[in-house]
Image (cartoon, rainbow, N blue to C red):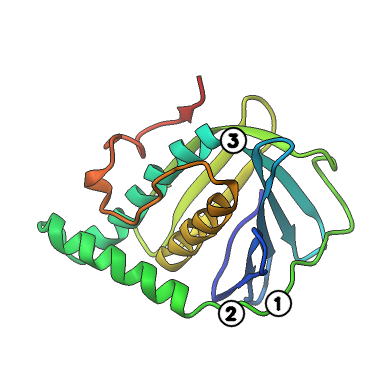
Amino acid sequence: MVWVSIPFLVTKSATTQTWIRALSTPTQLEQFSASYDATQDRLLLRVRTSDDAEFRFWLTRRYVDLLWPVLMKMADTFSARKAPTDPATRGILAEMAHGAAVSEANFSDQYQNGSSFPLGEAPILLSKISVTTKEGNTQTLTLLPQEGQGLHLELDEKLVHVIARLLQEACNGADWGLKLQVVSGDNNSDPGALTGVRRLH
């Protein structure tokens, strides 16, 4: 299980890769990397932890298309705690939070490869998504393959928006034609996205 902690920095290369670095004490998560692999026509998500272990996952276009509204619903959940009865205000708050998270990012560091691979060096194809919503400042996003181990991320509001930016940048390189716009979760097609596991079919 890999947990995201804060505060964090975000870094990006001049190509289609984007990174997130978590800087906290104690730190379990060190960096994310998302890059487009044209041969596979998939995004390669890499996660490196503080013990220099690296976890690798494939994200298909379909998977990203399912993941995006889940992220927006998570963002809306955070915004709803500030404006519970006003969907329009929640949308504005979500856009402001996204802009603030991106503007605070640091785009100078490079992703550092891990030295060990607990789940193997071959990337694991993700197919399921679930979210655990709870009181407080975080929600748990779980990304899983059809069978076996996956990724469990404890995310605050800022990190939800930074991961959204990560996907936007990587998908721009993929040229998949996905409309990954920051909108209120109420405007997404699956209002029940946080109530169970979403699967690829």
Q: Mark 2 and 1 residues: CB-CB less than 8 Å, in contact?
A: yes
Numbered mark located on residue 109 in the image: 1
Looking at the image, is 23 positioned above or below residue 192? below
Q: What residue is shown at x 84% (from left), y 48% (from top)?
A: 117
Residue 178 seen in render: yes
Other-residue count near label 3 (Cα within 10 Å), few / some / many at <14 / 14–19 / ≥20: some
Q: Mark 2 and 3 residues: CB-CB less than 8 Å, in contact?
A: no
Q: Residue 96 vs residue 139: left or right?
A: left
Other-residue count near label 2 (Cα within 10 Å), few / some / many at <14 / 14–19 / ≥20: some
Other-residue count near label 1 (Cα within 10 Å), few / some / many at <14 / 14–19 / ≥20: some
Residue denoted by label 2: 106
Numbered mark located on residue 60 in the image: 3
Numbered mark located on residue 127 in the image: none
**Please, what secondary structure does the residue beneath circle 3 have?**
loop
Q: Residue 99 vs residue 83: left or right?
A: right
Looking at the image, is 108 positioned above or below residue 141? below
Q: Amino acid at mark 3?
A: Thr
Q: CA distance from mark 3 to mark 1?
A: 26 Å
Q: In this view of the protein, which residue sits in the foreground, 168 or 156?
A: 168
Residue 196 in percent (x, y) is at 40, 31
Q: What residue is shown at x 33% (from left), y 48% (from top)?
A: 73
Residue 91 in percent (x, y) is at 22, 60
**Please, what secondary structure does the residue beneath circle 1 have?**
loop
Q: In terms of sequence position, does the residue under pointer 2 or pointer 3 come before the other?
A: 3
Q: Mark 3 and 1 residues: CB-CB less than 8 Å, in contact?
A: no
Q: Amino acid at mark 1?
A: Asp
